[in-house]
Image (cartoon, helix red, strand yellow):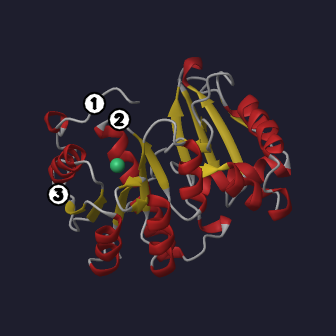
Amino acid sequence: MNDSTPSPASAQPLHATPPAHMPLVLIIEDEEPIRRFLRATLEANHYRVKEAGTAREGTLLAMTTYPDVILLDLGLPDGDGLNVTRAIRKEARTPIVVLSARGQESDKVAALDAGADDYLTKPFGVGELLARLRVALRHVTAATSRGPAGIAEVPPYECTADGRTLRVDLAARLVFVTDQATGPESPGRREVRLTPMEFKLLAFLVKHAGKVLTHQMILKEVWGPQHASDVQYLRVYAGELRKKLEVDPAQPRFVITEPGVGYRLAEGAMPPGHGLAPR
Ligand code: CA
């Protein structure tokens, strides 16, 4: 997780060949060493980069340079990232990944509820940064190519951790776990039976796989706006889901807790035929 301190030395390219379209990342961050680390890492991984050191400049560049994704520091000298998020959201759906310091949980949640898409807690590693960007860009591609996603249009989700593969086919309403430990002769695949509410919760997580979802977002969507603050409901159902899906519900690998914020379903693999091909 937070295993590496930002340093350009760790900026190894992860792709062998550049993708056809090089996404533009706007960095809004006042600390120059972090900006430098981000630029070096992103350029080494075939992103284009624009930088701003203040809220004002950042908001302006967000509106005028049409970035594909924005990395936004929460603490800026002339204002906070929350106001920048609100200003950008009035104009554009550009994905925003918030950069926050430890202990800013309530700020992070406020930014996410105001329309930011995800967050990274400093210090973060290169792998984490690239994963967040990949997920943010994938969701924007999905949203523009499919419109508001109906369950039937979400591709099957598949993720392997701790020797177990979780597969969720929302269209068919089927959930399977396969344990590799049992050997290829008896692959140990079994269907998981979920209650309607558990399925609804899992479906929302699958639609946003890899992305953090705040308690409030999940409660509003799954239980309805009147239950937006009933975090206890969510804890109970998340616990039930884990009992059915995880190898060790106490060490969840699929339904991951984001402390003080909400939940994130592990990113999973893109099934064949559902790549990031630009339209
Ligand atoms: Ca700052």
- Work out which residue is located at the far front of the displayed protein and give it: 78
Which quadrant is the N terminus positioned in?
top left
Quarter where residue 166 is shown: top right
Question: Dot 2: few (<14), some (14–19), or many (≥20) neighbours within 10 Å?
Answer: some
Give the residue at x 29% y 28%: 4
In the picture, measured across the screen, residue 215 lies left or right of residue 45, that is: right
Q: Which mark is residue 5?
A: 1
Give the mark nearest the N terminus, 2 or 1: 1
Disc 1 and disc 3 in contact, CB within 8 angstroms: no
Q: Amino acid at mark 1?
A: Thr
Residue 123 position, x and y percent, is 35, 35
Mark 1 vs mark 3, CA separation in Å: 26 Å
Quadrant the C terminus occupies: bottom left
Q: Is residue 104 something that shows in the picture?
A: yes
Alpha carbons under labels 2 and 3: distance apart: 27 Å
Asked if disc 2 is less than 8 Å from ligand 1, the answer is no
The answer to which image quadrant residue 245 occupies is top right
Task: In this rendered view, identify the residue nearer to me: 20 or 102.
Answer: 102
Tell me the amino acid under the disc marked 2. Answer: Pro
Frontmost residue, 221 versus 214:
214
What's under tag 3, amino acid-wise? Answer: Pro
Q: Which mark is residue 18?
A: 3
